[in-house]
Amino acid sequence: MRGDVRRTAVGEMEGSNMTRASVRCWGYVINGKCYRFFQMKKDFREAEVYCRNSFAGGHLASVNSATQHDQLVGLVKAANGGPTLTWLGAFDFMETGQYIWTDGSNWGYSYWMPGEPNHDKKGDDQHCLQMFMMDLKWWSLADCSEKRSFICSYPYPA
């Protein structure tokens, strides 16, 4: 086990006062959050709503360090058998060039593909963050209405 990362598949826990988030983590536990990859395809808003409705405190995943990014890349590759275009929880709907994580985390790390983020195209609807452009772990912008796999994160008790 490296640092505060646990790969886990925890089954049902006993006790009637357990929340959805405390019941199981079928993914990676990183710094007190469960990160779970979903192969099903949803647009950005649908994926965020799915995370919120499925897990107490759930959102699309935010990424705050290179180590965490590498762990999420590993999660997707292990669950999917390789890379696939995957939504992360950042967007720029106000078209300011300032990205916001859906969980409210501070923006302090990025891994943009060369030439991204590209705001020079007129009429561009690419405001949502995806990972694995060109099968690499780079980040790029995509049209939020595109269907992608996604990663949810939610608080997970240690």
Image (cartoon, rainbow, N blue to C red):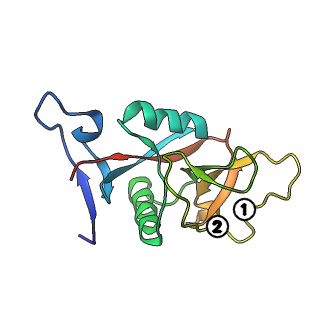
| Direction from residue 80 to residue 27 in the image, left or right | left
Image quadrant where residue 38 sits: top left
- Inspect the image, locate mark 2, and give the three-letter code of the amino acid beneath it: Trp
Q: Secondary structure at mark 1?
A: loop
- Point out which mark residue 112 bears: 2
Looking at this view, is 123 or 103 the one in front? 103
Outermost residue toward the right in this view: 122
Q: Is residue 32 left or right of residue 82?
A: left
Estimate the x, y position of residue 83 in percent, counting from the top left: 52, 60
Counting from the top left corner in percent of width and height, residue 27 is at 33, 51
* Residue at 19% in and 33% down: 18
Q: Which residue is mark 1?
A: 117
Identified by mark 1, the residue type is Pro
Within-10-Å neighbours for mark 1: few <14, some 14–19, many 20+? some
Q: How many marks?
A: 2
Rate crowding at label 2 as few (under 14), some (14 to 19) or many (20 or more) other CA atoms within 10 Å.
some
Q: Observer-nearest residue: 81 or 65?
A: 65
Distance in Å between CA atoms under marks 1 and 2: 7 Å
The reply to whether discs 1 and 2 touch (Cβ–Cβ < 8 Å) is yes
Q: Position of residue 23 (x, y in %)?
A: 22, 38
